[in-house]
Image (cartoon, grey):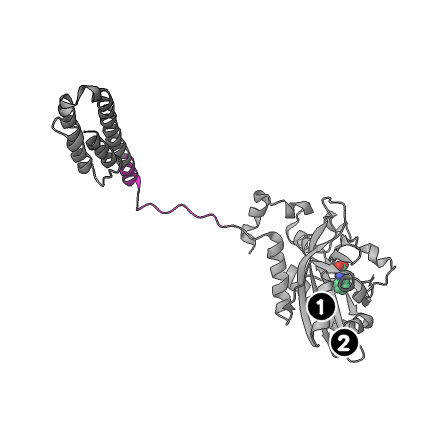
Amino acid sequence: MKERIKQLLADINALNVSNSEEIEALRIKYLSKKGEVSNLFNDFRNVAAEEKKEVGKLLNELKNKAQDKINQLKEAFEKSNDRAEKLDLTRTPDPVELGTRHPLSIVKNEIVDIFARIGFVIAEGPEIEDDWHVFSSLNFPPEHPARDMQDTFFITKDPDVLLRTHTSSVQTRVMTNQKPPIRVLCPGRVYRNEAISYRAHCFFHQVEGLYIDKNVSFADLKQALLYFAKEMFGEETQIRLRPSFFPFTEPSAEMDISCNLCGGKGCPFCKNTGWVEILGCGMVDPNVLENCGIDSSVYSGYAFGMGVERITNLKFQVKDLRMFSENDMRFLEQFRAAY
Ligand code: PHE
């Protein structure tokens, strides 16, 4: 009898059903008046007196177990049935929220597209650099104050491992690895040790350009930049170049565009000057060409560099630079329509 009870317990544990008729059949098989469990109860009187206590307990356990199992199956079946009834196959699916491109990516892509149309290809390089690629090759003398213009994050001083302060380091890499003609655009993140505020951050993004060939002149530079300004900010945009200084270009200039908010009439944004600065540029210093193994008596070139945040601000008037790195969805979602 004990064996039989154990066998039934195991059977009941393993039960499964696929429809409600099967559940009813099981109930009849085990729990009805003529069912397996009732039969065992009928046989109970034949159990030897000294075993009655133990077998009685087992029998009660079996009965409860059978009851529980069948209830459980019923419940599970009703639940799944419930879901099937509520599933409306004719309903249109929930719309999937599409992410938005980051405003800096939108603007960087636009800059890259504009220059790609006049033959510039992308070159990339590491963010962790050494002194040679970031400074020395670019004609920064060891103690020259120009190094202070770009407060640098050093990872180690000796050997000098540092975070690049501009993507001109990529230009050095290209010049040492490729033969002219060279026409590259170097987008990327750069780092400077600045106090973080609404108008400065310890990292930002640049796109720098480099063109080296025979007979490249300042007029070529100016024409390329005028084309860029008109494509980026509109056909009516004007440019002006102001003399400036960079160790790696000679002559050097900074370029302003006519204020794209007031059209050059003067407004708070351009501090009533009608002009806003957007980039640095110049003719590649012959020393730089020689440092990178390019014969400066045969080749000349121009270079320019701009901050992507700056251009993005001009396009979208983002007042606080920190917004770009906070990942606030309310900010980022506003650029949904911009690309
Ligand atoms: N590398 C300069 C900067 O980071 C920008 C620049 C590039 C200026 C090329 C002139 C020519 O400020």
Residue 111 image-quadrant placement: bottom right
Residue nearest the viewer, comparing 269 with 297:
297
Position of residue 122 measured from the top left corner of the image (x, y, whole percent):
63, 66
Q: Which residue is mark 1?
A: 173
Left or right, residue 45 beside residue 337: left
**In what quadrant of the picture does the C terminus appear?**
bottom right
The magenta stretch is: 79-98
Q: Is residue 93 magenta?
A: yes
Label 2 neighbourhood size at 10 Å, few (<14), some (14-19), many (20+)?
many
Q: Which residue is mark 2?
A: 294
**In what quadrant of the picture does the N terminus appear?**
top left
Q: Residue at x 86, y 61 (%)?
A: 142
Q: Residue at x 24, y 22 (%)?
A: 54
Residue 5 image-quadrant placement: top left
Tell me, yes or no, if residue 54 can be seen here.
yes
Marker count (numbered): 2
Kind of residue at badge 2: Ile
Kind of residue at badge 1: Arg
Tell which quarter ligand 1 is in: bottom right
- Relative to residue 146, is residue 223 depicted above or below? below
Spatial CA distance of label 2 from label 1 is: 12 Å
Position of residue 48 measured from the top left corner of the image (x, y, whole percent):
17, 22
**Residue, far left:** 34
Residue nearest the viewer, comparing 191 with 270:
191
Residue nearest the viewer, comparing 188 with 238:
188
Position of residue 62 measured from the top left corner of the image (x, y, whole percent):
23, 28
Left or right, residue 39 beside residue 151: left
Question: Could you say whether the residue bearing mark 2 is in a helix, strand or loop?
Answer: loop
